[in-house]
Amino acid sequence: MIRKNPNGHLPQIHESAYVAQTAILCGKVIVQENVFIGPYAVIRADEVNKLGKQNAQN
């Protein structure tokens, strides 16, 4: 599943990469060529500050 983070950014996934249907990618994640992301993996890039608060739009 490909999801936007709170700032509205989507992952970028190279066409040669494999992402399992049950994996979750959220936010400013960049997946390079020939990368394998297996079942039930969760990779997030939510862009929060030191206090855990959402940053302003980047």
Image: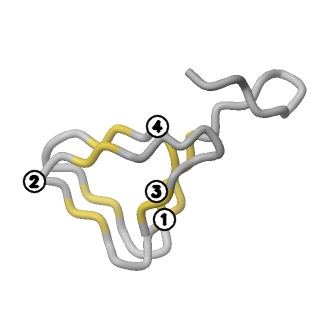
Q: Is residue 16 above or below residue 41?
A: above
Whole-angstrom CA distance, mark 3 to mark 4, is: 9 Å
Name the N-terminal-most of marks 2 and 4.
Answer: 2
- Quarter of the image with the N terminus is bottom left
Residue 4 drawn above or below residue 48: below
- Residue 24 numbered tag: 1
Q: Disc 2 and disc 4: Cα gap in Å?
A: 18 Å
Kind of residue sitting beneath label 3: Leu
The residue depicted at 73 percent of the width and 31 percent of the height is 48
Question: Is mark 1 in CB contact (under 8 Å) with mark 3?
Answer: yes
Discs 2/4, front: 4
The kind of residue tagged 4 is Lys
Classify residue 41 as left or right of residue 57: left
Instruction: Tell me the residue that label 4 is attached to.
Output: 28
Q: Which x, y percent locates residue 2?
A: 42, 62
Residue 25 numbered tag: 3
Mark 3 / mark 2, whichever is N-terminal: 2
Alpha-carbon neighbours of circle 2 within 10 Å: few (<14), some, or many (≥20)? few
Where is residue 22 shown, x and y percent of the image?
43, 78
Kindly state the secondary structure of the residue where label 4 is placed.
loop
Front position in the image: 44 or 37:
44
Quarter of the image with the C terminus is top right
Residue type at mark 1: give it. Ile
At numbered mark 2, what does the secondary structure look like: helix, strand or loop?
loop
Residue topped by disc 2: 16
Decide which of tag 1 and tag 2 comes sooner along the chain.
2
Q: Secondary structure at mark 3?
A: strand
Task: Say whether marks 1 and 2 touch (CB < 8 Å).
Answer: no
Q: Residue furthest right?
A: 51
